[in-house]
Image: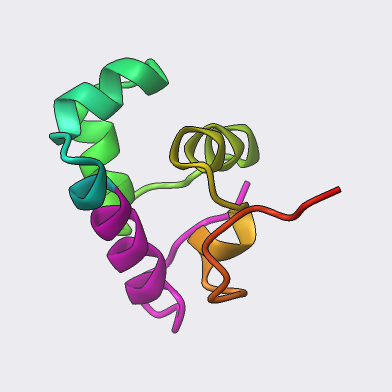
Amino acid sequence: MIYLEQSDKYVKEVCMRLRSLRAEAGIVQQTLADVLGVEQSTYSDYENGRTQISTPMLIKLADYYNTSVDYILGITDIRFPYID
């Protein structure tokens, strides 16, 4: 699992990207939580860097937003997923 600690310099970027992607999709946290099969409070914790985001959950998020895990994690600024 990837653990987002408050001291992690990438936490703010990950949180910002999750919020931005959700806002661009025009959905509220509860809708996304339902899609992901988690409680709204859990998803809120993801956006605020207060809980672990498992690798399978990162993959679900990337698939839902049609982006890459690398983009969500701030490894790349390329929004769209890799092309095979």
Task: Tell me how the rendering is colored.
Answer: rainbow
Residue 39 vertical position relative to residue 80 in the rendered view, above or below: above
The one nearer the camera, 82 or 28, is: 82
The answer to whether residue 42 is left or right of residue 26 is right
**Horizontal and vertical percent for residue 4?**
45, 61
**Horizontal and vertical percent for residue 33?**
28, 25
Residue 75 vertical position relative to residue 4 in the rendered view, above or below: below
**Horizontal and vertical percent for residue 63?**
56, 35
- Name which residue lies at 73% across and 55% down: 82
- Name which residue lies at 25% across and 42% down: 25
Which span of residues is magenta-colored?
Answer: 1-21
Residue 22 vertical position relative to residue 6 in the rendered view, above or below: above
**Horizontal and vertical percent for residue 47?**
27, 52
The answer to whether residue 69 is left or right of residue 28 is right
Residue 49 can be seen, yes or no: yes
The answer to whether residue 37 is left or right of residue 41 is right
Residue 45 vertical position relative to residue 16 in the rendered view, above or below: above
The answer to whether residue 5 is left or right of residue 42 is right
- Name which residue lies at 32% across and 52% down: 21
The quadrant holding residue 42 is: top left
Q: How many marks?
A: 0
Q: Is residue 14 magenta?
A: yes
Q: Is residue 71 magenta?
A: no
Q: Residue furthest right?
A: 84
Q: Residue furthest bottom?
A: 9
Residue 50 can be seen, yes or no: no
- Name which residue lies at 52% across and 42% down: 66
The one nearer the camera, 15 or 65, is: 65
